[in-house]
Amino acid sequence: MEKKTVEAPKKTTYAFDVPWEQLLDEGGFMKVFLSEVLENYVQQQRWYGGKSSTLKYIELQEYFRIQQREEVYYGLLLEVNFEEAFFQHYFLPIAFVSDESFAEKDRILPVTIGGVEGFIIDAVNLEAFRRLVYERIATAEPNDTTRVRYHRSAIFEPGPYETSKFMGLEQSNTSIIINGRSVIKFFRRIYADKNPDYEMSRFLSERKGYKNTPAYQGSLSIMDADNANITIALMQELVPNQGDAWEFMLGELHKIFSNLEYKGIDAENLPNVELFQRLKIREVPPEIIDWAGLNIFLKLQKLAQRTAEMHIALGSEFEDTAFTPAHFNGDYEVWLKNRLLYMFQNRLNTVENNLHRLEGTTLELATEFLERKNEIRKRFVNFDWTKLKGERLRVHGDYHLGQVLVQGDDFYLLDFEGEPESTIRDRKVKQPPLKDIAGIFRSFHYAVYATIFNHEGEYPYSREALFRAGELLYRYFTGVFMETYVQLIQVHNIDIGYSAERIFLLKYCMLEKAVYELGYEMNSRPHWAVIPLEGIRSIINDKN
């Protein structure tokens, strides 16, 4: 006779004699849920951004229903308060399921509700929830004025829901692929305003017809108690791709560094070029083309073209004040200097407190950084808006190779949320477009050094010799990019200033980026701090 396996009953610690639709009005539930359950759950999530701080308590700022007919889920807006006297807001959708097979991931709480045993889970793990959100966006009215607002782009033609799945591991958001053609990104860290990623995506694809970013398809937002429009989710086109430009660049650079030995190239005698000198491909010396190959320079031209086209779209708006170009002024100068001097002091403190963790070249560069702090500070202070004639635009704000998808010989730009450290207000400040160029150039610099670190011992040259070769290659990369970018920008009358102004702004923004990066590296992987430290030194040493 076959022996039957008897499953152990689910142990329910908490029971509430109310239906699911009234659970969040139950004071006893909320007290238990916020203090005893959520604090532990939230701190374990990949999207939680407060891991370096001490959580004090969590408050439910407000909640809202995400529903379709009788199917009800809750969206929670959580305020996470820290001992360090600041707070962050997070979005958490919850569902109640009685079938254990639906609660295999992200169980938050075993609970009995109205006599039914089950689990409260993160609703994103439930296909029924993902289907509901997609269908509410796909059938949204053009001008939704309710508190929970669904929006569908006029240029999006949705089909019926078929399938959905998670899009890999992510840090700050949760992205779901729908029908293999769309992506719904649920923002976990939220702000009392429209998310820049939503604003920029919708503006570029709907208003300007910019083709090289995933097309905006729809969104979900909530009007909170203070009448602020908070973006909860963004739906965009799924762009078929071969991965991001960071991985592509690492692969190309590995081949280039391998060529040093394979082609017997003497890197010490390769022709040099001034930093940021504009270069047409035909002006790149044949020795450099022989070493690096022509293809990488053609790809850089294409990336420069797509970047310029993004800025042309962002700089050609004269109705929507959030996107109209602006000139430099005293208010911008004060904002910029205050922000950068605060950041710089923070990085000085971090380096001083972590010198004992450094060695070799990294230690030498960190010591030099501290010794030259007044010189670097002076560079930040030396910003005089009255000498600048160019315009400021809404920009990407966190532009690097990881924010670019590779599709054949083309590139798609994405993730317009802005720098993670910046406030939501700072992310929307109009900046010189060269801020984005500085970001992508710093990313080139990172890729050069990451390739050397990742293939330690594979190239028969000293690390210092590889660094010198990499710095030389970097100058040609930036020169070819700049030529294509500036030429296209000027043809479309986007004012990025005269030649000397462009070089000043580019160096200023690159110094800012390198100092910004230094904080992350010192805290996360100190041996990589050599990359931003080398970047800082090269900018400070360049007197042109």
Image (cartoon, rainbow, N blue to C red):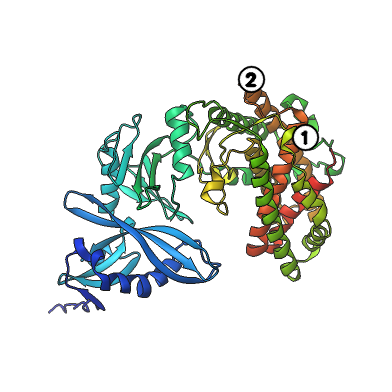
Q: Quadrant of the C terminus?
A: top right
Percent from the top left, x then y, of residue 239? Answer: 44, 38
Q: Quadrant of residue 17?
A: bottom left
Whether 253 is drawn above or below 279: the answer is below
Percent from the top left, x then y, of residue 227? Answer: 37, 48
Percent from the top left, x then y, of residue 21? Answer: 20, 60
Circle 1 — which element?
A: helix
- At label 2, counting other C-alpha atoms closer than 10 Å, the crowd grade (few under 14, some 14-19, many 20 or more) is few
Label whose residue precedes the other's in the sequence (2 or 1):
1
Callout 2 amino acid: Val
**In this picture, residue 433 sits left or right of residue 283:** left
Q: Which mark is residue 491?
A: 2
Q: Nearer the viewer, residue 140 or 225?
A: 225
Q: Quadrant of the N terminus?
A: bottom left
Q: Which mark is residue 288?
A: 1
Q: Nearer the viewer, residue 7 or 385?
A: 385
Q: Nearer the viewer, residue 167 or 541?
A: 541
